[in-house]
Image (cartoon, rainbow, N blue to C red):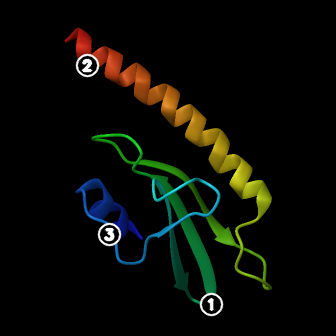
Amino acid sequence: MGYALYLAQSGDKPPSAKPLKGFGGASVLELVENYDGDTYRAIYTVRFEDAVYVLHCFQKKSKSGTATPQQDIELVRSRLRTAEEEHIRWLQKQKKR
Protein backbone atom coordinates (compact mmCIF):
# COMPACT_ATOMS: atom_id res chain seq x y z
CA MET A 1 0.00 0.00 0.00
CA GLY A 2 2.91 2.32 0.72
CA TYR A 3 4.23 1.97 -2.82
CA ALA A 4 0.78 2.69 -4.26
CA LEU A 5 0.60 5.92 -2.23
CA TYR A 6 4.10 6.80 -3.39
CA LEU A 7 2.92 6.41 -7.01
CA ALA A 8 -0.02 8.72 -6.28
CA GLN A 9 2.33 11.32 -4.78
CA SER A 10 4.48 11.05 -7.91
CA GLY A 11 1.48 11.85 -10.12
CA ASP A 12 0.80 8.30 -11.26
CA LYS A 13 -2.34 6.27 -10.66
CA PRO A 14 -1.60 3.00 -8.87
CA PRO A 15 -3.02 0.02 -10.80
CA SER A 16 -4.97 -1.10 -7.73
CA ALA A 17 -6.63 2.31 -7.12
CA LYS A 18 -10.37 2.53 -7.79
CA PRO A 19 -12.70 5.52 -7.46
CA LEU A 20 -14.69 5.43 -4.24
CA LYS A 21 -18.40 5.47 -5.03
CA GLY A 22 -20.41 8.45 -3.87
CA PHE A 23 -17.70 11.08 -4.31
CA GLY A 24 -18.37 12.10 -7.91
CA GLY A 25 -15.64 10.99 -10.25
CA ALA A 26 -12.13 9.80 -9.63
CA SER A 27 -10.79 12.40 -7.20
CA VAL A 28 -11.32 10.16 -4.14
CA LEU A 29 -9.66 6.79 -4.60
CA GLU A 30 -9.52 3.57 -2.64
CA LEU A 31 -6.72 1.05 -2.34
CA VAL A 32 -7.56 -2.47 -1.17
CA GLU A 33 -4.87 -4.89 -0.05
CA ASN A 34 -5.09 -8.35 1.47
CA TYR A 35 -2.53 -9.56 3.98
CA ASP A 36 -2.49 -12.68 6.10
CA GLY A 37 -6.21 -13.32 5.58
CA ASP A 38 -7.26 -9.74 6.40
CA THR A 39 -8.31 -6.90 4.10
CA TYR A 40 -7.01 -3.36 4.52
CA ARG A 41 -8.15 -0.18 2.81
CA ALA A 42 -6.66 3.26 2.31
CA ILE A 43 -8.74 6.12 0.95
CA TYR A 44 -7.05 9.20 -0.44
CA THR A 45 -7.77 12.19 -2.63
CA VAL A 46 -5.91 13.71 -5.55
CA ARG A 47 -8.46 16.51 -5.85
CA PHE A 48 -5.85 19.18 -5.12
CA GLU A 49 -2.96 20.18 -7.34
CA ASP A 50 0.44 19.24 -5.89
CA ALA A 51 -1.03 17.35 -2.93
CA VAL A 52 -2.25 13.89 -1.98
CA TYR A 53 -4.27 13.64 1.22
CA VAL A 54 -4.77 10.23 2.83
CA LEU A 55 -8.23 10.50 4.36
CA HIS A 56 -8.65 7.14 6.08
CA CYS A 57 -6.91 3.77 6.51
CA PHE A 58 -8.58 0.82 8.15
CA GLN A 59 -8.93 -2.92 8.35
CA LYS A 60 -12.12 -4.20 6.77
CA LYS A 61 -13.83 -6.20 9.50
CA SER A 62 -17.06 -7.34 7.84
CA LYS A 63 -16.94 -10.89 6.54
CA SER A 64 -19.93 -10.38 4.23
CA GLY A 65 -20.05 -7.88 1.40
CA THR A 66 -17.41 -5.63 -0.04
CA ALA A 67 -19.11 -2.27 0.47
CA THR A 68 -17.33 0.29 2.59
CA PRO A 69 -19.31 0.75 5.84
CA GLN A 70 -21.36 3.97 6.03
CA GLN A 71 -19.55 5.04 9.20
CA ASP A 72 -16.25 4.98 7.29
CA ILE A 73 -17.79 6.89 4.35
CA GLU A 74 -18.98 9.64 6.70
CA LEU A 75 -15.51 9.86 8.26
CA VAL A 76 -13.98 10.20 4.78
CA ARG A 77 -16.47 12.99 3.93
CA SER A 78 -15.56 14.85 7.12
CA ARG A 79 -11.83 14.49 6.53
CA LEU A 80 -12.22 15.57 2.90
CA ARG A 81 -13.86 18.81 4.07
CA THR A 82 -10.97 19.33 6.50
CA ALA A 83 -8.44 18.62 3.74
CA GLU A 84 -10.13 21.22 1.51
CA GLU A 85 -9.87 23.82 4.28
CA GLU A 86 -6.23 22.94 5.00
CA HIS A 87 -5.33 23.08 1.33
CA ILE A 88 -6.86 26.54 0.96
CA ARG A 89 -4.82 27.74 3.95
CA TRP A 90 -1.69 26.18 2.47
CA LEU A 91 -2.28 27.90 -0.88
CA GLN A 92 -2.77 31.26 0.84
CA LYS A 93 0.56 30.85 2.66
CA GLN A 94 2.28 30.00 -0.61
CA LYS A 95 0.97 33.17 -2.25
CA LYS A 96 2.38 35.31 0.56
CA ARG A 97 5.91 34.02 -0.05
Q: Nearer the viewer, mark 3 or mark 2?
A: 2
Q: Which one is in front, 22 or 6?
A: 22
Q: Is residue 83 left or right of residue 92?
A: right
Q: Nearer the viewer, mark 2 or mark 1?
A: 2
Label 3 neighbourhood size at 10 Å, few (<14), some (14-19), many (20+)?
few
Q: Position of residue 48 (x, y in %)?
A: 37, 40
Cα distance in 3D space between marks 1 and 3? 20 Å
Determine the residue located farthest toward the bottom in the rendered image: 37
Write the residue at 72% across / 73% down.
Answer: 67
Label 1 is placed on what type of residue? Answer: Gly
Q: Which one is in front, 57 or 19?
A: 19
Q: Is residue 78 left or right of residue 32?
A: right
Label 2 neighbourhood size at 10 Å, few (<14), some (14-19), many (20+)?
few
Label 1 neighbourhood size at 10 Å, few (<14), some (14-19), many (20+)?
few
Residue assigned mark 1 = 37
As displayed, is residue 16 above or below residue 70? Answer: below
Residue assigned mark 2 = 94
Q: Secondary structure at mark 3?
A: helix
Q: Position of residue 11 (x, y in %)?
A: 24, 56
Q: Position of residue 34 (x, y in %)?
A: 54, 84
Write the residue at 51% across / 79% down.
Answer: 33
Residue assigned mark 3 = 3
Q: Which one is in front, 79 or 13?
A: 13
Q: Secondary structure at mark 2?
A: helix
Q: Is residue 53 left or right of residue 73?
A: left
